[in-house]
Amino acid sequence: MPEEAFLKALPERLREEQFSEGSPSLQTRKEQLLKLKSILLENEEAFMDALHSDLGKPAFEAYSSEIAVLLNEIDYIYRHLGKWMRPVKSRHLKMGYVETINRKRQPHGIVLIIGSWNYPLQLSLMPAIGAIAAGNRCVIKPSEHAPATARLLEGVMNAAFPPEQVTVVTGDAGTASLLTSSPFDLIFFTGSGETGKLVAEQAAEQLTPVILELGGKNPCIIDETGFSEAAIRDIVWGKFLNAGQTCIAPDTLFVHESIFEKALNDISAVITAFYEDRPQENSDYGRICTDAHFEKVVEFIGEGDVRHGGAHDRSGRFIAPTVVTDMIPGSAILQEEIFGPVLPVIPYRDLHTLLSSGMIQRDALTGYMFSKDKNGIQRFKEHMQSPTISINQVIHHAASPHIAFGGKGRSGYGAYHGKAGFLAFSYEKTEYRAHYFIRVRGKFPPYSERNMKALKKLRKWLL
């Protein structure tokens, strides 16, 4: 952990550099993005080893969900950055003058990024890509709960980037608290709602704007028209990817009662096909990140009847892919985000009753529905307040740079990925000029009734 004095002085040291050097040019930003891309490519195996050490991530999941999405984000932003940075000019004829408006995106300045442990590489660097593209200088604090990835990030990033451009700082919650109470120009946080509130409170003392990427109980509904083997495979894959530690994983599955038992049987069959009869020995299945989170997820299992799985081993932080039904009313598994490999499956009779029951978190990070019923899909879309709704697919939308990723309400606020990231880490600065050809004296005191009448007739020329 760096010394307290170093951490407190860090924002001002970077701000001095920003003030003396100004906003980086398009060429400089592109060079930084290419440098970041080189870091990912040159350390690909090392990152995958670190992710396996921290979370037991299989190489395929580590590459596809952490490295590949970052490379794609860099490529996309690199192609479009020049267009996004281009000033937008307009001219308008007014009463006695022509106004010229020049709008341009400006970096916030000094940005703090706090990553999360479940995707410790992606969630540390994905915001940094948008921040760099927008012209900011970044301090990145990876999660201490993924120590191998954090140490590797610190080593390779700090060796490649000058400290006045990008600095990676490792440490515990105390380090994060020191940073979030420091005078940054913007804080980007990914994590739990509980910690997100603390970050927002500390940032408020400095009047620092905050982007919060949190989580929620993402509902997944499958009706009789959307049921298929392919749908079950997608749901099982999305739920147990990264051992269920995904903020956009289907949290709870609601199944129409007419296909309930069939769906349960098919879910069990797919889990077995994916991970075989002994998932603890399967190299394609991950592990829980921390002991504390392991205990929390195991408690969820005891709040329902286990229909599949249920096995767990604390020594290796292993929890088998588990399906539970008949949950205790009011239990934590029905109220809290599970964030682990436990899938509650609940039957429902009709969609209207389900949506009005209060069982579905309307402002979850996302909502999923598998259906061919256009009316049902429309009703679900109108009911959900999530910024993103995915129909007949799970997870994939988060990998697209064309889609803004972010929450609303309890799932956070602010969005990034692609152009949304560039916009999130910048603000619009406007230069306004007036070129007079007639000086209208009637706008000055003393005012008169005649001038008021003229004003009402000519008001459009004031806008």
Image: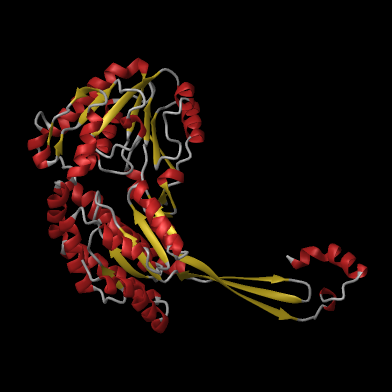
Residue 161, horizontal then vertical, whole percent:
25, 74
Above/below status of 224 relative to 446: above
- x 32%, y 35%: residue: 251
- Res 423 seen here: no
Q: Quadrant of residue 259?
A: top left
Q: Is 108 left, or right, of 243 in this rendering?
A: right
Above/below status of 118 relative to 335: below
Work out whether residue 370 or residue 123 is closer to the camera in this orientation and state it. Answer: 123
Residue closest to the far right: 450
Residue closest to the far left: 281
- Quarter holding the N terminus is bottom left
Q: Is 177 left, or right, of 109 in this rendering?
A: left
Q: Is 24 left, or right, of 266 in this rendering?
A: right
Residue 16, horizontal then vertical, whole percent:
38, 81
- Quarter holding the C terminus is bottom right
Above/below status of 49 relative to 286: below
Q: Quadrant of residue 420?
A: bottom left
Work out whether residue 369 or residue 353 is closer to the camera in this orientation and state it. Answer: 353
- Res 383 seen here: yes
Residue 422, horizontal then vertical, whole percent:
42, 62
- x 39%, y 43%: residue: 365
Residue 334, horizontal then vertical, whole percent:
34, 30
- x 49%, y 23%: residue: 352
Q: How many marks?
A: 0
- x 17%, y 57%: residue: 147
